[in-house]
Amino acid sequence: MHTYKKKVAMLDVNEAAGQELQVQLNQQYGSEQTQFYKADVSSDQQFTDVFQKILNKFSHIDIFCNNAGIVDEKNWEKTVSINLSGVVRGTYLALDHMKKQNSGNGGVIINVASLAGLGPFPSVPVYTATKYGVVGFTRALAVRTGV
């Protein structure tokens, strides 16, 4: 049986938690298997810069997972920016890199939503809307691109 090890790049705004997780994962799976980057997915510049740093370190991306999310109904614009715009931004960055016509090797993009993306959660309407958006965006893009 073959054992395939992939390297993992993680990004988050919480630098302390990210670095702690990186240490734990590297201890468990081997040195230099994971790399943490501090970035805010709602910032186009930060996300693009970190994406390029990841490519510079690992040279390619096989699997890209959009998993950032918050629940903040009072600061609803921030919720939309992170939960929906961040997913769209990350997906297009990964898709552009992975496209075979751009000399990419293909790959997998995973967009994490929530049960709130499938049915209404009345206590958190903005959060629900963002997760509906993730599901709709992912489905529409799959039909358009075949991925």
Image (spheres, grey):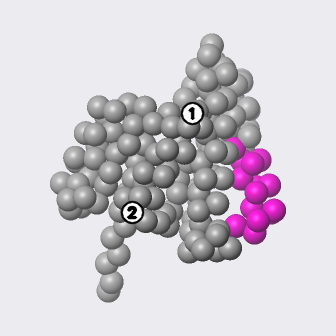
Give whichever of discs 1 and 2 has the lower sequence position.
1
Q: Quadrant of residue 3?
A: bottom left
x, y percent for residue 121 = 69, 29
128 in the magenta segment: no
10 with respect to 32 (left or right)? right
Q: Secondary structure at mark 1?
A: loop
x, y percent for residue 14 = 38, 31
Q: Residue at x 80, y 55 (%)?
A: 140
What amino acid type should be assigned to the residue bearing mark 1? Ser
* Disc sitting over residue 58 in the figure: 2
Q: Which residue is mark 1?
A: 43
Q: Quadrant of residue 55?
A: bottom left
First to last magenta residue range: 134-147
Q: Residue at x 43, y 54 (%)?
A: 54
Q: Residue at x 62, y 26 (%)?
A: 79
Q: Which residue is outermost to the bottom?
A: 1
